[in-house]
Image: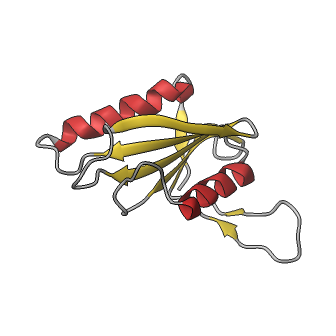
């Protein structure tokens, strides 16, 4: 597990601890590509503001171009499962991935998630999971 401080400079500091960090390169010299925050709260039309703030803060700290909030599908779905772009801020694209935990074939659902991450364009180089 890699520990990174949230702030670059400051007298009060805390660790930046996203759920998953994907990076290209080596552990000694990584290029951070994707931050994934997994939430237990069922997906609504848009993620909670606190969840957005959290993933954007981590993405800024890691200077990461792709930020993904993963949420389970609601028992009363408000939209399709899969990846959708929420917006772009300071060159960082924020995504929501809605996962169907009730799918009859969870391995297929997992494969769809992997393909979605691949379509972000980050798997063209070898990735290292740092968390």
| Residue at screen point 61% across, 38% down | 87
| Residue at screen point 70% across, 46% down | 28
| Residue at screen point 37% across, 63% down | 41
Residue 131 is situated, as x and y percent measured from the top left of the image, at 53, 56
Q: Is any part of residue 1 visible from this angle?
A: no
| Image colouring | secondary structure
Q: In which quarter of the image is the N terminus?
A: bottom right
Q: Is residue 73 above or below residue 9?
A: above
Q: In which quarter of the image is residue 40?
A: bottom left
Which is more toward the observer, 48 or 115?
48
Residue 34 is situated, as x and y percent measured from the top left of the image, at 57, 41
Which is more toward the observer, 80 or 103?
80
| Residue at screen point 37% across, 53% down | 43
Relative to 72, 28 lies left or right: right
Relative to 2, 40 lies left or right: left
Residue 96 is situated, as x and y percent measured from the top left of the image, at 46, 44
Residue 78 is situated, as x and y percent measured from the top left of the image, at 32, 46
């Amino acid at each position: 597990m890699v520990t990174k401080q949230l702030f670059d400079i400051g007298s009060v500091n805390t660790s930046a601890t996203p759920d998953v960090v994907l990076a290209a390169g080596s552990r000694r010299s990584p290029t951070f590509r994707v931050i994934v925050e997994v939430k237990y709260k069922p997906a609504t039309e848009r993620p909670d503001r606190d969840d957005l703030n959290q993933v954007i803060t981590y993405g800024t700290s890691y200077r990461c171009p792709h930020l993904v909030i993963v949420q389970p599908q609601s028992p009363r779905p408000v939209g399709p499962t899969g990846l959708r772009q929420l917006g772009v801020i300071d060159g960082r694209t924020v995504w929501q991935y809605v996962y169907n935990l009730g799918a009859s074939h969870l391995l297929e659902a997992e494969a769809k998630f992997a393909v979605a991450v691949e379509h972000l364009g980050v798997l063209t180089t070898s990735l290292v999971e740092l968390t």
